[in-house]
Amino acid sequence: MAASMRLNNPELQRKLEEVENYTEDTIASIARYYDETEEFPHEPMEYFFQNDFFSLLTSNSEEDLTVFLETIRIVSSKFAALGSILLTQGFYAVVPLHQFGTDEQKAIYLPDLISGTSYGGFGLSEENDSGDPTYIHTLAVETPFGWVINGNKKYISNAPLASVLLVAARTKSLDGSDGTGIFIVETDRKGLTVTEPMEKTGITSLQVASVQLQQIEVAHDALLGNTLEGVDQVTFTMNLMKLSVAMQAVGIAQGAFAKGLEHMSVVRKFGNRLIDNQSTQEKMADMKTSIYSAEAFVRMVMTDTQNSIEVAMAKLLTANIALEVTESIIQLTGGYGFMKDSDIERYIRDANVTSIYGGSSRSQRRMITEPWVNS
């Protein structure tokens, strides 16, 4: 696992070093168990709640945000599904409420989300879409008493255990105007159904499900920020989500590289090691360079988290490198890499997910090329 970056705040530096130690000492030894059983990792999540990690996302400090993103990278180098759960709770629940919620909304929901008393999720994705807020089909119609929401959401992370969902919807106001909003919806509302968790090949401990909304009635003050600025709110949220997935992809690549190098450095029966082969050395050198360049690029993009095109580049680049590194490590380690007890095959399953969720690699390419097409 690569060393964490140096921070100006000594307290934050210690916090990050504690995460590194906890990841090495505890998370690394339990990751395979949770991957095989697909259980939700309540115990390791409790560590992050007890150490108040989600408060880092409510301070508006760049260094606090950096620590949280670095935590995603570090954790994902050993147990990517845990990284996914952390970033879902952080960037799909805590951040939009903190950034856009009214004082009353923050007071009601943030304390429980930060402490772990409740989990949250973000209802954006729908059938056959790329998470683009301009193509939402879920509809919220305003009434004199509030809003009535109908629609179906797909692939919603944390949905099976969430107490509250932030649901993106097209809106039809009483004055006849159309818009887009995000609605705070408790999952025990009549008409809301969460399906059974979906079976996945990677990131298995992350619980993902579909959510059906049928005639869900909410009050006017359920509208996030009491404003119909859903497109901007979604864009802000998704940029941070993509950056966190980019850091996760870097962590997966670092973890796979370290596992592969460990195996290649073991002396074989006839005194040779895989790493003694010059061709292998050159391939490993190229991989190490790619991982470092990707990490450096993401950290550069972190200085302007709302540059949507650079964020898309970061997610596209890191997802590609995570896939390339994990596939190369499997090839270089031979049959060992395909064995479940090697953990390497888990890395390649998890790497594939980084090119899908938070916006597919294809959708990132479209976003990058959009200015050329529209010029």
Image: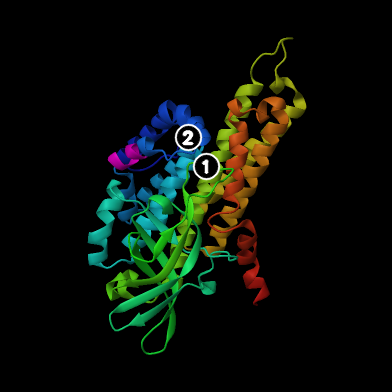
Disc marking residue 315 = none
> Percent from the top left, x then y, of residue 302?
47, 54
- Vertical position of residue 206 compared to residue 278: above or below: below
Give the amino acid at mark 2. Answer: Tyr
Instruction: Name the main secondary structure of what is drawn in magenta.
Output: helix
Colour theme = rainbow
Question: Quick one: label 2 or label 1, which is nearer the N terminus?
Answer: 2
The image shows residue 191, relative to residue 86, as above or below, that is below
Res. 73 in view: no
Label count reads 2
Q: Residue furthest right?
A: 279
Which residues make up the magenta segment?
45-50
The residue pinned by badge 1 equals 204
**Which disc, if any, is residue 34?**
2
Location of residue 334 by image quarter: top right
Task: State the residue at coordinates (29%, 84%).
Answer: 144
Residue 263 lies left or right of residue 18; in this view the side is right
Query: Which residue occupies the foreground of this view, 128 or 230?
Result: 128
Residue 180 lies within the magenta run = no
Label 2 close to label 1 by CB (< 8 Å): yes
Q: Amino acid at mark 1?
A: Thr
Q: Position of 360 compared to 78: left or right?
A: right
Residue at image point 42% right, 54% down: 159
The answer to if 48 sits in the magenta stretch is yes
Q: Is residue 32 above or below residue 298?
A: above
Measured in 3D between alpha carbons, the distance from the residue under mark 2 to the one under mark 1, in whole angstroms, is 8 Å
Mark 1 element type: loop
Q: Position of residue 105 (x, y in %)?
A: 26, 64
